[in-house]
Image (cartoon, rainbow, N blue to C red):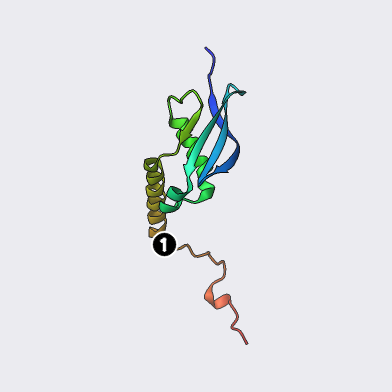
Amino acid sequence: MKNHTTSFVLSGFSHDLGFRIFEFDCLENGKVRTRHTVRADLMLVRKHGIHVQELPLLCRKVLDDCQEWDRSGSMTLSEAEMMACAEREAARSRSSKRRPPRRPESSETPEQIEPAR
């Protein structure tokens, strides 16, 4: 039985009237099969506080999770997907704020440190 793998590789992006359009090559078993595009509305991106740098991975996740694409290979990143991304980031931020700050451990004891003159 063959191991069938499909992955999406970002091949570029462009802009079109307030949208950033990401182009992905769909690789099946290491060979390019099809080209897919995902459109992201930049106004919604700003509204939900998503960093533009996060968009390529978010778009790729949408492609990975999608079971069927239309014949043109085009999708639009939905506001619900953007909201879910923003919620995950907020939860991650809250959990990182709960951790106490780490202090570097010093190998010297207070008695070994000479006072400043």
* Category of crowding for the residue at label 1, using alpha-carbon neighbours closer than 10 angstroms: few (below 14), some (14–19), many (at least 20): few
- The quarter of the picture where residue 28 lies is top right
Q: From the viewer's perspective, is 98 left or right of 41?
A: left
Residue 24, given in percent of the width and then of the height, sits at 57, 33
User: In this picture, is 28 found above or below 113?
Assistant: above
Tell me which residue sits at (47%, 33%) in the image: 75
The amino acid pointed to by label 1 is: Pro
**Relative to the observer, which residue lies in front, 20 or 16?**
16
Tell me which residue sits at (37%, 51%) in the image: 91
User: In this picture, is 44 found above or below 33?
Assistant: below
So how many labels did they put on this image? 1
Helix, strand or loop under label 1 = loop
Residue 88, given in percent of the width and then of the height, sits at 39, 47
**Farthest residue in the front direction?**
17
| Residue, disc 1 | 100
Tell me which residue sits at (49%, 31%) in the image: 74
Residue 62, given in percent of the width and then of the height, sits at 45, 35
**Relative to the observer, which residue lies in front, 45 or 97?**
45
Q: From the viewer's perspective, is 14 left or right of 83?
A: right
Residue 69, given in percent of the width and then of the height, sits at 46, 26
**Farthest residue in the bottom direction?**
117
**Relative to the observer, which residue lies in front, 60 or 80?**
80
- The quarter of the picture where residue 94 lies is bottom left
User: In this picture, is 111 found above or below 89?
Assistant: below
Quarter of the figure with the C terminus? bottom right
